[in-house]
């Protein structure tokens, strides 16, 4: 699944602020859940699963990016969100740098290949430091989504 297909304007949060990564995961999960009309108990359970997974395996990949992700039976389709954190947030990333871009991915259970492909596609889009910096300057969720779509198109045009 493409990164852009995970997102809607409502699941892209600009100037995001949270006191720590646990609150950040909780807030972004709540937004994604509400926008996608998930039951409140499912949002709570998904949040719990994401936090448990984060405690076991840190998703701060470095270069200011974190990709908290899970596979769960509580969704029927892949869901996602993006929080842009200009001030940065401590995420215990592998490079020990603060996270400025947090991408949340929730994939239906038993779709392992889709799970891995989606994470890989997000990483590919977010790999370029100039692109990441451009996202920090966006002033609307619509602009962010358009930038991501354009970046995916650029990457596709370079593939053989």
Image (spheres, grey):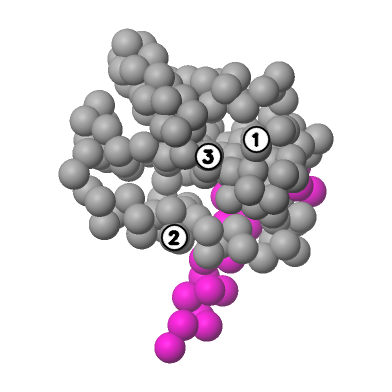
According to the picture, the residue beneath numbered tag 2 turns out to be 120
Please tell me which residue is depicted at 72% across the width and 62% down the height of the picture.
129
Marker disc for residue 125: none
Q: Quadrant of the C terminus?
A: bottom left
Query: Which residue does the image show at 32% across and 11% down from the upper left?
Result: 41
The crowding category of the residue bearing disc 3, from other C-alpha atoms within 10 Å (few below 14, some 14 to 19, many at least 20), is some
Q: Relative to residue 39, is residue 102 depicted above or below?
A: below
Q: Comparing marks 2 and 3, which lies closer to the viewer?
A: 3
Q: Is there any visible trace of residue 83 in the rendered image?
A: yes
Q: Does residue 80 appear in the picture of this structure?
A: no
Left or right, 73 with respect to 120, comes to left
Magenta-colored segment: predominant secondary structure = helix
Q: Which mark is residue 58?
A: 3
Name the residue nearer the viewer: 94 or 62. Answer: 94
| Towards the viewer: 121 or 71 | 71
Q: Is residue 93 magenta?
A: no
- Do labels 1 and 3 touch, CB within 8 Å? yes
Residue 106 position in % (x across, y down): 37, 37
- 81 left or right, relative to 52: right
Q: Is residue 77 left or right of residue 123?
A: left
Q: Which of the labelled discs sits on residue 91, or is there none?
A: 1
Question: Of marks 2 and 3, which one's residue comes earlier in the chain?
Answer: 3
- The furthest residue to the top: 41
> Mark 1: few, some, or many residues within 10 Å (few <14, many ≥20)?
many
Quadrant in which residue 69 is drawn:
top left
The residue nearer to you, when weighing 92 against 115, is: 92
Is residue 152 a member of the stretch shown in magenta? yes
Contact between labelled residues 3 and 2, with CB atoms less than 8 Å apart: no
Q: Report how far apart the C-alphas of labels 2 and 3 lie in the structure.
A: 16 Å
Assign a secondary structure to mark 3.
loop
The residue shown at (72%, 44%) is 96
Q: Secondary structure at mark 1?
A: loop
């Amino acid at each position: 699944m493409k990164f852009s297909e995970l997102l809607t304007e409502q699941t892209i949060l600009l100037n995001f602020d949270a006191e720590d990564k646990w609150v950040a995961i909780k807030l972004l999960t709540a937004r994604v859940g509400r926008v996608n009309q998930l039951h409140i108990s499912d949002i709570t359970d998904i949040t719990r699963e994401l936090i448990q997974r984060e405690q076991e395996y840190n998703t701060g990949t470095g270069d200011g990016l974190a990709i908290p992700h899970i596979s769960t039976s509580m969704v029927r389709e892949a869901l996602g969100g993006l929080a842009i954190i200009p001030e940065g947030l401590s995420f215990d990333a592998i490079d020990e740098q603060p996270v400025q871009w947090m991408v949340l991915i929730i994939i239906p259970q038993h779709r392992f290949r889709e799970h891995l492909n989606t994470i890989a596609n997000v990483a590919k889009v977010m790999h370029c430091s100039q692109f990441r910096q451009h996202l920090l300057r966006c002033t609307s969720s619509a602009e962010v989504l358009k930038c991501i779509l354009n970046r995916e198109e650029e990457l596709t045009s370079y593939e053989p």
